[in-house]
């Protein structure tokens, strides 16, 4: 006959087993292989009349560094080097990206101009997730001749409203359903009434994946359910034996 203390020990053991089963299955990123993207500038502005595709553009795989020395296109002008770099390691399930330019000016119609220095966007990812940052050393936006200073090294998703014209987001960060992190050092959105503009300076994306040889979970809940079922099976077996 099973005593109350014995039953208590059985229940405790089953609970411990459930914890072990549940914690033994690690959570993996949703991608099957690591990926990364980086570019320094892009624009879709003035009712698509001034569109600048991402440049210079680097993607992983295969990765590598892409550089432009000087650029005058659409709203952008600089004589500095624009550099975009991506890399990854499928064995470890990691990726990284960076996009940099030392100095860049913007001209968005007669009402708005910008000047940015020390633009740098970076990110890195592994099977457990991604981190990143997008910063400027200094910057100004001049609206109708009135300058506004942009915050250096701003916290993520710092929003600056340009009254009557639109919004600027510094260190913009978001993560999609595949745990891919996107970082924009500077993202300018002008109102459609002004012809519209979607301008990005310093863009990176990073997504990790299970390391080679690892078995990814389909869903984190699968591990919890599996652990609970396994614990129930242990409890049932032990209880049956004690009853016998």
Image: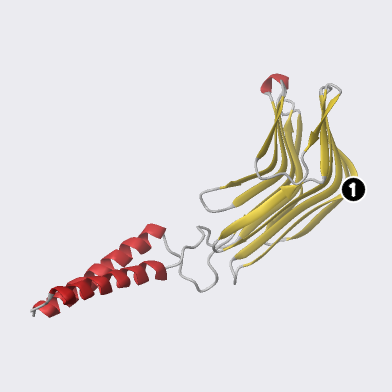
Is 62 or 1 nearer to us in this picture? Answer: 1
Q: Does the rendering let one see residue 221?
A: yes
The spot of residue 136 in percent (x, y) is 79, 45
Image quadrant occupied by the N terminus: bottom left
Report the residue at 26% width, 66% height from top.
229
Residue 116 in the figure: left or right of residue 91: right
Report the residue at 37% width, 64% height from top.
223
Residue 234 in the figure: left or right of residue 125: left
Could you tell me how many numbered marks the image carries?
Answer: 1
The spot of residue 113 in percent (x, y) is 83, 30
Report the residue at 55% width, 70% height from top.
211
Name which quarter of the figure residue 167 lies in.
top right
Residue 207 in the figure: left or right of residue 99: left
The spot of residue 3 in percent (x, y) is 12, 76
Is 185 situated above or below 17?
above
Q: Name the residue under label 1.
A: 80
């Amino acid at each position: 006959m099973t005593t109350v203390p014995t039953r208590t020990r059985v229940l405790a053991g089953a609970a411990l087993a459930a914890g072990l089963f549940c914690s033994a299955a690690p959570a993996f990123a949703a991608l099957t292989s690591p990926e990364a993207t980086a570019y320094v500038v892009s624009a879709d502005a003035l009712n698509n009349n001034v569109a600048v595709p991402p440049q210079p553009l680097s993607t992983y795989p295969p990765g590598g560094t892409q550089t432009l020395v000087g650029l005058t296109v659409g709203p952008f002008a600089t004589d500095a080097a624009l550099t975009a770099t991506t890399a990854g390691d499928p064995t470890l399930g990691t990726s990284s990206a960076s996009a940099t330019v030392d100095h860049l000016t913007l001209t968005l119609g007669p009402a708005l101009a910008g000047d940015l220095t020390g633009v740098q966007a970076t990110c890195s990812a592994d099977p457990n997730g991604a981190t990143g940052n997008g910063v400027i050393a200094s910057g100004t936006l001049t609206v109708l001749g009135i300058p506004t200073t942009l915050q250096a090294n701003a916290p993520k998703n710092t929003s600056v409203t340009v009254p009557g014209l639109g919004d600027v987001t510094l260190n913009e960060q978001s993560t999609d359903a595949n745990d891919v992190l996107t970082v924009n050092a500077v993202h300018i959105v002008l109102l459609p009434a002004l012809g519209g503009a979607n301008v990005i300076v310093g863009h990176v994306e990073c997504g990790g994946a299970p390391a080679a040889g690892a078995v990814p979970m389909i869903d984190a809940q699968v591990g919890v359910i599996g652990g609970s079922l396994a614990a129930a099976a242990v409890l049932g077996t032990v209880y049956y034996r004690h009853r016998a």
